[in-house]
Image: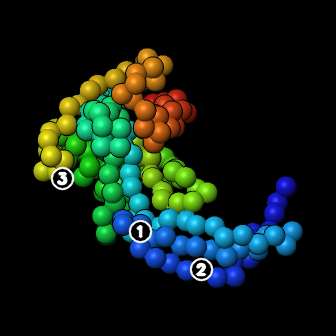
Amino acid sequence: MSRRLPVIHGITEHDAGPYRMERLDLEFSNGERRRYERLHGRGHGAVAVVPMLDAQTVLLVREYAAGVHRYELGLVKGRIDAGETPEQAANRELMEEAGYGAHRIDVLRSLSLAPTYMSHQTHIVLARDLYPQRLPGDEPEELEVVPWKLDEIGQLLGREEFSEGRSIAALFVAREWLKQHAGE
């Protein structure tokens, strides 16, 4: 069923740290009026990088995660800086966090984190044909790089330290893309 988008009668804004909070005065097609809030990031989006060491091995990183106060295993991730493409940001973040660059970089798709109230987008990027290359990053300590076989994703999902949604989704998207593009 296709529905007409709600009419926006007004928007008010205020700062909310790294985000801009908007309050929308909406009217739905059935006449109901509601106020919704949404967050807009101040940046240019983010990347989640799936770095393939070889055809079967992805590189994960272990870093401190303040939100859960533990070390979390996940993919290389980071902001897209002003003037960067997702591909450029992915390669830079890969060099900063894992100590590799990539000769082949493909943007597979974008993900919404919480589309009901956030505009933030994360681009899933597949990085292949890796070579050693380190750039200084903004992490307070060097990240541990952990190779993981793609055919062992089930075991990875069972680990408490692997819980970040973007990393989980990106691995499945990349695995399916690689199956469909085998030999490329």
Task: Pick the residue in front: 16 or 133.
Answer: 16
x, y percent for residue 15: 41, 73
Disc sitting over residue 163 in the figure: none
**The disc labelled 2 sits on which kind of residue?**
Ile
Marks 1/2 in contact by CB < 8 Å: the verdict is no
Residue 156 in view (yes/no): no
Q: Is mark 3 on a helix, strand or loop?
A: loop
Residue that numbered label 3 is attached to? 138
CA neighbours of label 2 inside 10 A, class few (<14), some (14 to 19), many (20+): some
Residue sitting at x 85%, y 55%: 1
Q: Which of marks 3 and 2 is in front?
A: 2
Residue sitting at x 58%, y 56%: 115
Left or right: residue 8 compared with residue 77 = right
**The disc labelled 3 sits on which kind of residue?**
Asp
Q: Is mark 1 on a helix, strand or loop?
A: strand
Q: What element carries label 2?
A: strand
Earlier in the chain: of badge 3 and badge 1, it is 1
* Quadrant housing the C terminus: top left
Residue that numbered label 1 is attached to? 16
Residue sitting at x 41%, y 60%: 45
Residue that numbered label 2 is attached to? 11
x, y percent for residue 176: 54, 32
State the separation of the CA atoms marked 3 and 2: 35 Å
Q: In this view, does 144 lie above or below 105?
A: above
Marks 3/1 in contact by CB < 8 Å: the verdict is no
